[in-house]
Image (spheres, rainbow, N blue to C red):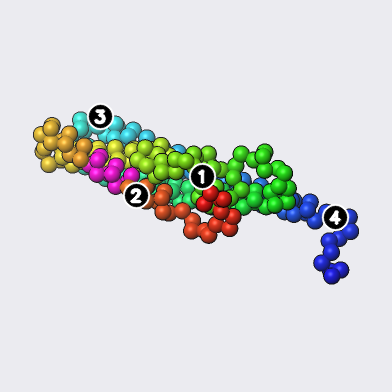
Amino acid sequence: MSSEMPPAGRDPAAAKLQILATEHWSLLATRSLTYTESFSRVTIFLTILSGAVIALALVAQVSHFGRAFIAIAIPLLAVVVVTGISTIARLMRLNHDDFLWVVGMNRLRHAYLDLHPELAPYFLTSPYDDLPGVLQTLGIDIANTRRAGSWLHVIQVLPGMLSVIVASVVGAIGALAALAVGAPPWGVVLAAAAAFVIGMVWLTLWGRRALRGGGPRLEPRFPSPSA
């Protein structure tokens, strides 16, 4: 029994709070790194896109939008599309990681309340580690959880915004391909519109599936009372 006693002069509750606070700060730092990488990935993609547009503008001045311009523009824009898809995939992975860190912080918050339940009225974020608890911590209205994964919500987040840009580049490739085969102006417009719609629908469906079913599979230890 004596071996289980805490050292003299040391409060076991204070030691627990110190350990929990250290882990909490660790998760906060990890979330900060996640956001930093997200913004860096977006910046890299936009830099590549801007460089491609500038390069095509220089080529257009020399070739006057002739066949040489089309021959260079299509593979260059294809590289932009591949880079964009890779960036979107990484952003979705980072969003999943951020979900995981929020679950961990909610569990730590639950531990704080176990030690000091009188602090519950002062917490805006949730101490529960299920989906409603995570959404509350992220500031998403729990009563409207169906909005998470809706078409409007998908294009508001970073992967969705990049999807619009990538689909636009796909539309430009479709227009250039139509020009390469000698299509009339209306055919070029239709090809661009069709390529944009196909690219946007595919990217949006991909994003919705990832948002709804791609999160970390963790069994809630402290589910919400309403759940």
- Image-based side of 62 in relation to 121, left or right: left
Disc 4 secondary structure class: loop
Callout 3 secondary element: helix
Per the image, the residue denoted by label 3 is: 61
> Label 1 to label 4, Cα distance in Å?
37 Å
Rounded to the nearest angstrom, the CA distance separating label 2 from label 4 is 53 Å
Kindly identify the amino acid type of the residue bearing the numbered disc 2. Trp
The residue at 20%/40% (across/down) is: 194
Going from the N terminus, do you reach mark 1 or mark 4 first? 4
Q: Main secondary structure of the magenta part?
A: helix
Residue type for callout 4: Arg
C-alpha separation, residue under disc 3 versus residue under disc 4: 76 Å
Q: Earlier in the sequence, mark 1 or mark 3?
A: 3
Image point (10%, 34%), residue name: 184
Which quadrant holds residue 3? bottom right
N-terminal label among 2 and 3 = 3
Residue that label 2 marks: 206
Residue at 59% over, 45% down: 126
Q: Position of residue 168 (x, y in %)?
A: 29, 37
Residue 13 on image: x %, y %: 78, 53
Residue 107, label in figure: none
- Compare marks 3 and 4 and give the one earlier in the sequence: 4
Disc number lying in front (2 or 3): 2
Gap in angstroms between the C-alphas marked 1 and 3: 51 Å
Please give the residue where the numbered disc 1 appears in the rendered image.
Answer: 135
Badge 3 crowding class, 10 Å Cα cut-off, few under 14, some 14 to 19, many 20 or more, is few
Q: Residues within 10 Å of mark 4 (few under 14, many from 20)?
A: few
Question: Which amino acid type is shown beneath numbered disc 3?
Answer: Gln
